[in-house]
Amino acid sequence: MLVLLAGVAAQTSEQKTQLRSQPTFYKDIVPILQDKCQRCHRSGEAAPMPLVTYQETKPWATKIADVVEMKMMPPWFADPRFGRFANDPSLTAEQIATIGAWARAGDPAGDPHDTPPLREWSGSWDIPQPDAVVKMPEPVRLPARGEVEYTYEIVATRFTEDKWIQMAEVRPSSPAHVHHAVVYIRPPDSPWLRHAPVGAPFTASMLSDSEERRQAHETTSDLLLVYAPGSAPDRWVDGMAKFVPAGSDLVFQMHYTTNGQTASDQTSVGLVFAKSQPKQKVITLQLNNHALVIPPGAEDFRAEVQGTLPNDATLLSFFPHMHLRGKRFEYDIVRDDGSVETLLRVNYHFHWQLSYKLAEPRELKAGTKLRAVAWYDNSKNNPHNPDPEKTVTWGDQTSEEMMVGFFDVAIPASMDKWRYFIRHDATGGKKQ
């Protein structure tokens, strides 16, 4: 009897120790959710369910454990062999193990007093409360089905002085319908789309002038930022910022998709101004290949484009863009001896188009050759492929394809984008 009682006592003590070591929601899971998940998984955001309270999270415990174990969440598609990125949201091995242990233990709540302070969000913004919000004046009505032509809306900023933008964030009112958005800066002296309506949505086909219909798809205007579901706001370090001249307009280029329900969208962009004059101006450049011809059934079709930097620049970040047949995307430096340094390789995911911000900005000299390489799966094995028997070429709609390698660089604040593209020969003279 004494031996039996001793055994029971030892077992009870062991169980208590095990219970104390088990992760609990309030102590161990909330900090992970706040840091890695709640940017999307909170009320009003793009994710399908909030993960803020215990009651909201508990029904999903097993599913959460599964998707983090498979590294499907948080979404991140950069090949870890190439580059380090400041905005990598990937969980550590310890965090993944903690979530798994919590789910296996029956997702215990624990003591609410262990909860860390709630993370403060600036209303609906991920950036601090914006200094200015520029909103499309009229909502865009969206049908339940069919393809929607690229939709534009030109919005006057009414800035009476030049502005330097330290942070910017796009907020669609109907994120489920926005495939991506590009916000351009149109300076007051720009001739781009000057006969297009201001403050009202329009498409290229609605423009009466053939030259302006072409201009809707091509511009040398700088980008304020690019948005896609899952992409993070732009946050430039002190001393770097985007430039919006006084009197500029913002041109919203919206790519909408339908999902069986009618809707309307009225996208806004929030702006946080730099507190002092920056030393460097951030501009967005592109490596594009408009000559895409992807054969039917091609499982691993490769396309590339390359160019050389006309002047010195500091490389900051990447944003690859493709459509439904996109498979992989890569940015490289190609040296004169033919050797290649891969800066980023992405296992592309159409529904999660992310930006990749270098952990350490890279100084690049004039003449550096940058290359973008993209691979496409136009076969029946691609579950997103709308028609594997079709020859696919460049086009706006997701049933067509694109290859756009956006990348951000910093240049001297006094240099505009046009001056940056003036090349110089060895004597310092200008070249075309």
Image (spheres, rainbow, N blue to C red):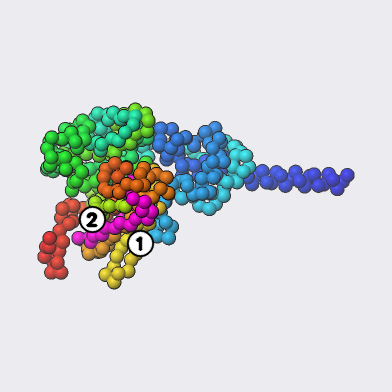
Residue 310 among magenta residues: yes
Disc 2/disc 1 C-alpha distance (Å): 23 Å
Mark linked to residue 342: 1
Q: Are marks 2 and 1 in contact (CB under 8 Å)?
A: no
Asked whether the viewer can see residue 272, the reply is no
Query: What is the span of residues highlighted in magenta in the rendered image?
Result: 296-323
Q: Position of residue 7 (x, y in %)?
A: 81, 47
Q: Residue furthest bottom?
A: 337
> Viewer-proximal residue, 274 or 88?
88
Tell me which residue sits at (26%, 59%) in the image.
306
Mark positioned earlier in the residue sequence (2 or 1): 1
Classed neighbour count for the residue bearing mark 2: other residues with Cα under 10 Å, few (<14), some (14–19), many (≥20): many
Element at badge 2? Answer: strand
How many marks do you count on the picture? 2
Q: Residue furthest right?
A: 1
Q: Residue furthest front?
A: 389
Q: Position of residue 14 (x, y in %)?
A: 72, 47
Mark 2, residue position:
411
> Viewer-proximal residue, 101 or 263?
263
Question: Would you place residue 177 above or below residue 92 in this image?
Answer: above
Residue type at the position of mark 2: Ile
Mark linked to residue 102: none
Element at badge 1? Answer: strand
Residue type at the position of mark 1: Thr
- Describe residue 77's horizontal placement relative to residue 392 as left or right: right
What secondary structure is the stretch in magenta mostly built from?
strand
Q: Position of residue 20 (x, y in %)?
A: 65, 44
Q: Nearer the viewer, mark 2 or mark 1?
A: 1
Tell me which residue sits at (36%, 53%) in the image.
298
Tell me which residue sits at (24%, 28%) in the image.
138
Among the 4 quarters of the image, the one containing residue 336: bottom left
